[in-house]
Amino acid sequence: MLAAKAALHYIEDGITLGVGSGSTVNCFIEALGAAKMQFADIVTASDESTRRLEALGYRVSDLNSVGRIDVYVDGCDEINPHKAMIKGGGAALTREKIVAACSAKFVCIVDESKQVPVLGRFPLPVEVIPMARSFVARELVKLGGEPRWRENVVTDNGNWILDVYHLEIAEPYKLEEAINNIPGVVTNGIFARQAADVVITAYQSGRIGTR
């Protein structure tokens, strides 16, 4: 993917790199391998990304053993004009949010289909402690959403996912905080506090846009 290759311009040898998860990030990992770049440390947001990087010969570190991450590269499921996002389609939202929070710069790589004026077209993932699934679902209904359990999906943290449909997220920061305050919620897929610093967008025409 063109956006994944363009992200290489924002990283350099010797830095501490954060790597997200998902199909777009898989393209970025392939581009890293082809460029043969080397880093002080690499931290990932998913076991799958770790496996892919290790297959290319990279050593992946535990976040607890490194300092601040210089650049974090990840994709998203939706992004608004203010660079707030919905993430978690691949169920890695909690680790993605943690790594993003530890990073000096968040570079988001997307194609033009992910750009929306208002978040909410993509169902909002919410990671929950299994015993709290029904309670959290009832609380999400009170917020105007339609939660559906993503059955047979267990996160890397051993938790479950509720996907919340029919939300129009006009105030992402406020809703992110409200959902995170529900007992039993680990975190939700609104990235407003951890919004992207740089967005690289690939267009069907072959143009790359950066904002």
Image (cartoon, rainbow, N blue to C red):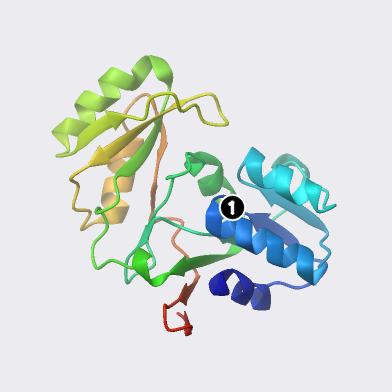
Side of 89 where 175 appears, left or right: left
Q: Which image quadrant: the C terminus?
A: bottom left
Residue pictured at 70% horizontal, 72% vertical: 11
Can the viewer see residue 70?
no
Residue at which label 1 appears: 20
Side of 72 where 13 appears, left or right: right
Side of 38 where 157 appears, left or right: left
The front one of 130 and 142 is 130
Q: Quadrant of residue 178?
A: top left
Q: Quadrant of residue 95?
A: top right
Q: Using the image, determine if residue 36 lies above or below residue 54.
A: below
The front one of 38 and 102 is 38
Q: Which image quadrant: the N terminus?
A: bottom right
Looking at the picture, how far across and down is residue 127, in whole percent? Answer: 41, 33
Q: Amino acid at mark 1?
A: Gly
Can the viewer see residue 58?
yes
